[in-house]
Image (spheres, rainbow, N blue to C red):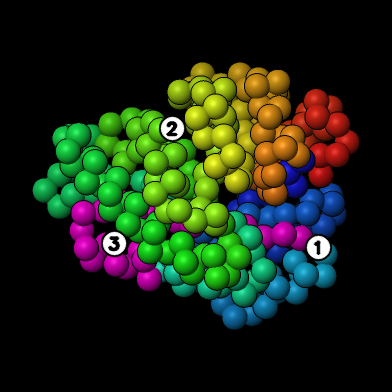
Amino acid sequence: MPTLALVSVIHDDDPLRTMFDFAIEHDFKAVELHGKFHNAESLTEAEIAYLRRVSESNGIGLTLHYHHDALPGSHRRSVWDSLLESFTRNLEMLGSLGGKVIVLHPGKIDVPTLDRPEDGSELIRREAVRNLKRFVRTVAPTAERLGITICIENLKHDPGFVLTSYEDLASVIDDAKCDYVGAVLDVGHCIIGDGLPEAIEILGDRIKHLHLNDAIDGIEHKEIGIGTLDLDEMAPLMSDEMNIEFATLEIGARDPDSDGIILRSREVLKSHYGESVI
């Protein structure tokens, strides 16, 4: 059964310490750092020392969601090189904290001559897939050295995105030929997209990490139990057979009732899957 993780940014007021205080108070054993705010470029030495101290002393595992707007399939060499440098730096920081998972968005097509990514041809998209594969192959040895799994997230399969199917995602993972590269399955993206059972069938044991959230009227990241998420369909992901260490609750961000949303969602999961949910 995966260990439930909180996202480090839920509250605007001192979010890092607030979420760790909340995790300790309510006995959560993992926190996923939000890479837009809590990353190697923005965290101070004092904050990194705090993270190391509070995670080690309270047995809290750490994961990192790298920048949501990353473009690892970019056709712009300067963008690709800059991202490679930053991602490597964040891998090293996470390794120093004992973290085990870093999430990577495959992102949108990024071509200098295109104002709108969705206007790109299939040929351009396939070139972007090759750029993404090259990026993952390049960073995989560093991740393996540090014992961190790079988990590539399933996004919406819309025109303009580098990956437009679960098969595309599987091909990037397989191309890396590394046990430290896998998929993070966002179940909310699945249920408003190409389906959760389909994702489980196609990606299988490539799935190494989860983002848990519900969806209503095509909008994801809602409180678990109030939308269209089928907990029976999700059951294989919550079993020990999948060997998934962490499942991040991507819910409640900046909602006035964020704490309640998180706690109620955990109770829904416990009611369905048993008290082994932690």
Task: Tell me residue 143's x, y (percent).
Answer: 52, 65
Q: Earlier in the sequence, mark 2 or mark 1?
A: 1
Q: Which residues are magenta?
A: 59-85
Q: Is residue 172 left or right of residue 117?
A: right
Q: Is residue 49 left or right of residue 155?
A: right
- At label 2, the amino acid type is Tyr
* Quarter of the image that includes the N terminus: top right
Residue at the spot 45% in from the left edge and 23% down from the top edge: 194
- At label 3, the amino acid type is Trp
Looking at the image, residue 7 lies above or below residue 165: below
- Would you say residue 33 is visible in this rendering? no
Task: Tell me residue 75's x, y (percent).
Answer: 21, 54
Q: Report helix, strand or loop for mark 1.
A: loop
Residue 141 or residue 53, whichever sits in front: 141
Mark 3 → mark 2, Cα distance in angstroms: 23 Å
Residue 253 or residue 130, whichever sits in front: 130
Residue identifier under label 2: 166
User: Which numbered tag is attached to residue 80?
Assistant: 3
Q: Earlier in the sequence, mark 3 or mark 1?
A: 1
Residue identifier under label 1: 59
- At label 1, the amino acid type is Gly
Task: Tell me residue 175's x, y (percent).
Answer: 39, 49
Looking at the image, residue 63 lies above or below residue 170: below
Q: Is residue 63 magenta?
A: yes
